[in-house]
Image (spheres, rainbow, N blue to C red):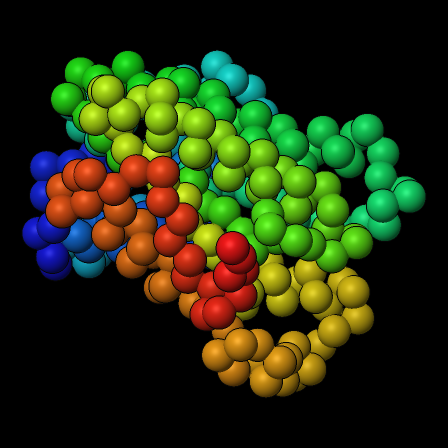
C-alpha cells in the first residue's frame, strides 16, 4: 500500500463497478479512507470487501444521486464515518444512445440528471466539509465526447460538455478555499458496461477488440489509467493544480 493519501477521506460516486470501482480501490491503496457509493448494495459491498482484503478502509453508502438530499447525505456519511471529507470523485454517469430525432424529454433528463445535476449537488454538499479541512480535491470524470461526439450520443456529449464547464467555473470559484477542481478525460475503456452496450448495438466482443487498431495509440485506455490520474490529482503534491484537463484517452480527445 502507498502512503500518498494517508489521512485523506474520499467519496467516489458510481463506484460499485467499472471505472468507479477501480478509482475507489486505487485511492484506498494509496491510503485514503473511501466511501463507495451507488444504488447496487451487493456490488458496492463487494468493492468494500476487496478494499478491506487489500488492507484498505472503506464503507458503502447506498445512494440515488437523482435526489439532491442523497448527494448531501453521501458526503455527510464520509464526515460521520471518517471525520471529514478531502476528496470527491464525481464518476457516476450514464451513456445510453438514441438518434437525435428520437430523443425524448425523459431520455434527456435521465442523462443530465446523473451526469451533471448530481455532480453539481455533490460538489455543493462537499464544499463546506472541505472548507473545514482547509481545502480539498474535487475530480470530475469526463469523456472525449465532451469535445465532439457521435450522433447517437449527442445528449451524453452535451452532458459531459456541461460537466467540463462546471469543472472550470468551480475551479475559479473555489480557489480561495484551496479546493481544487479538476477534470479527467476518459477515452475508450472496455468495462463490462461498455461490452454490454456494444453488444446491444450488434458489436460482439471479438469485433470490438479489433477496433483498437483504429485508435491513435493502437490500444484502448484502461480503468487503471483513470484511477491513477485520480490518485495524482487527489494528493498534496498537486496542491496548486486546479482547472486542469488530465487526458487519459490514449490520444483520443486531444483538442486545441
Q: Is residue 66 visible?
A: yes
Tell me the residue at 90%/42% (across/down): 102
Residue 24: x and y in percent read 32, 48
Residue 70 located left or right of residue 82: right
Figure quadrant of residue 106: top right
Residue 63 located left or right of residue 232: right
Q: Nearer the viewer, residue 221 or 197?
A: 221
Outermost residue toward the right in this view: 101
Residue 186: x and y in percent read 48, 56
Residue 30 located left or right of residue 175: left
Q: Nearer the viewer, residue 183 or 117?
A: 183
Seen in the picture, residue 103 relative to 212 is either above or below; the reply is: above
Q: Nearer the viewer, residue 98 or 36?
A: 98
Q: Is residue 15 visible?
A: no
Q: Nearer the viewer, residue 41 or 7?
A: 7
Quarter of the figure that contains the N terminus: bottom left
How many numbered circles are shown?
Answer: 0
Outermost residue toward the front in this view: 256
Residue 29: x and y in percent read 19, 54
Figure quadrant of residue 55: bottom left
Seen in the picture, residue 215 relative to 171 is either above or below; the reply is: below
Seen in the picture, residue 82 relative to 93 is either above or below; the reply is: above
Tell me the residue at 28%/14% (across/down): 128
Tell me the residue at 71%/77% (across/down): 204
Residue 207: x and y in percent read 69, 82
Tell me the residue at 31%/22% (across/down): 174
Seen in the picture, residue 101 relative to 188 is either above or below; the reply is: above
Amino acid at each position: 500500500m502507498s502512503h500518498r493519501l494517508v489521512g485523506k477521506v474520499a467519496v467516489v460516486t458510481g463506484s460499485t463497478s467499472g471505472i468507479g470501482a477501480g478509482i475507489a480501490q486505487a485511492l484506498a491503496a494509496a491510503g485514503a479512507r473511501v466511501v463507495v457509493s451507488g444504488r447496487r448494495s451487493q456490488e458496492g459491498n463487494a468493492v468494500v470487501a476487496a478494499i478491506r482484503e487489500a488492507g484498505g478502509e472503506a464503507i458503502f453508502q447506498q445512494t440515488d444521486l437523482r435526489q439532491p438530499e442523497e448527494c448531501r447525505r453521501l458526503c455527510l456519511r464520509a464526515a460521520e464515518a471518517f471525520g471529514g471529507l478531502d476528496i470527491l470523485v464525481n464518476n457516476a454517469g450514464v451513456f445510453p444512445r438514441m438518434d437525435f430525432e428520437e430523443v425524448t424529454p425523459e431520455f434527456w433528463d435521465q442523462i443530465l440528471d446523473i451526469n451533471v445535476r448530481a455532480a453539481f449537488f455533490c460538489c455543493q454538499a462537499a464544499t463546506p466539509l472541505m472548507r473545514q479541512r482547509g481545502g480539498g480535491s474535487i475530480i470530475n470524470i469526463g469523456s472525449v465526447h465532451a469535445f465532439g461526439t457521435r450522433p447517437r450520443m449527442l445528449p451524453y456529449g452535451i452532458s459531459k460538455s456541461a460537466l467540463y464547464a462546471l469543472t472550470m467555473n468551480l475551479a475559479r470559484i473555489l480557489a480561495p478555499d484551496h479546493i481544487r477542481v479538476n477534470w479527467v478525460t476518459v477515452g475508450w475503456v472496455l468495462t463490462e458496461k461498455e461490452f454490454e452496450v456494444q453488444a446491444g448495438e450488434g458489436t460482439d466482443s471479438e469485433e470490438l477488440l479489433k477496433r483498437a487498431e483504429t485508435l491513435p495509440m493502437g490500444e484502448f485506455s484502461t480503468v487503471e489509467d483513470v484511477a491513477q490520474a485520480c490518485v495524482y490529482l487527489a494528493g498534496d503534491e498537486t496542491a496548486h493544480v486546479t482547472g486542469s484537463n488530465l487526458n487519459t484517452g490514449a490520444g483520443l480527445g486531444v483538442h486545441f
